[in-house]
Image (cartoon, rainbow, N blue to C red):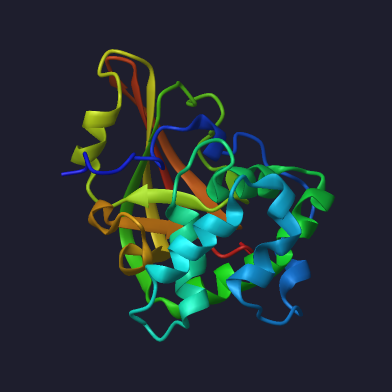
Amino acid sequence: MFNEAKFWFSLEFSNINVTQPTVDSPLSACEQLPLMSLEEALKPVDNLIEELNKYVYIAKSHSKNIKDGLSQDESASIRIYTMDWGDTSIYRILNIALRSEDRSQVKAWLPYLKLFTTALHKLPSFQGVVWRIVQMDLSKDFIQGQHRTWWSASSTIQDASVLEHYTNPSGKRSLFSIECQHGKDICRHSEYPSEKEILLMPGFHFLVKSVLKAGDGMYIIGIKEIDPAC
């Protein structure tokens, strides 16, 4: 079912925060910014992304059928996030900046983040269990009872059985079982709608509920979304 697209959100260790920055949310600075077109919002990062204009054109041309009350630019801001064209793909470069404790790395992304998060907030929230897997043992990095934050946008999937096709069954793996309250179903705005992806927004706060060894190198880490004030 997933052969037509790279399953880009499940396996990359670089998208899992194993340390929690101690500084304020990188998103707070974009709250007062005006909404811009996708072209304008990404102009500050043009030097970071190869052939950006081409991918902006593709994203907007694939976002002409307005859904969920989003504008074309808002929908395209989600679509271009899901597109993968290698090391300079937006989701890769943006999440590196969001995870950095050096908040100056986020500055150029603020106009895009304003557009992107505005679009995500307009989507209905998904409540339920979603899944995410990483091809390494992270059991020692997540401690039961610990409060943590993922500053990057975190991609998850609703059907855990699908993940088996994208991991080495005999290698070390960490499977995250995530109880989310405000996940965003981005399928109708994704380049790969069949993947049924739920996106956890940047600044996802959670409680580590359990860390279990399942055998054959697999650890299951249970986490639950919580209010940042908790």
In the visual, does 208 lie left or right of 215?
Answer: right
Report the residue that reaches farthest toward the bottom: 69
Image label count: 0
Q: Position of residue 154 (x, y in %)?
A: 49, 50
The residue positioned 29% from the left and 19% from the top of the image is 168
Question: From the image, which quarter does the C terminus lie in?
Answer: bottom right
Q: Position of residue 184 (x, y in %)?
A: 40, 66
Q: Nearer the viewer, residue 165 or 91?
A: 91
Q: Nearer the viewer, residue 226 or 196?
A: 196
Against 217, residue 196 (above or below) is below
Against 26, residue 157 (above or below) is above
The residue positioned 30% from the left and 25% from the top of the image is 167
Is residue 191 something that shows in the picture? yes
Question: From the image, which quarter does the N terminus lie in?
Answer: top left
The residue positioned 73% from the left and 71% from the top of the image is 30
Q: Quadrant of residue 44?
A: bottom right
In the visual, does 62 lie left or right of 98?
Answer: left
The residue positioned 35% from the left and 67% from the top of the image is 126
Q: Position of residue 96 (x, y in %)?
A: 65, 42
Is residue 78 something that shows in the picture? no
Q: Position of residue 13 (x, y in %)?
A: 51, 30
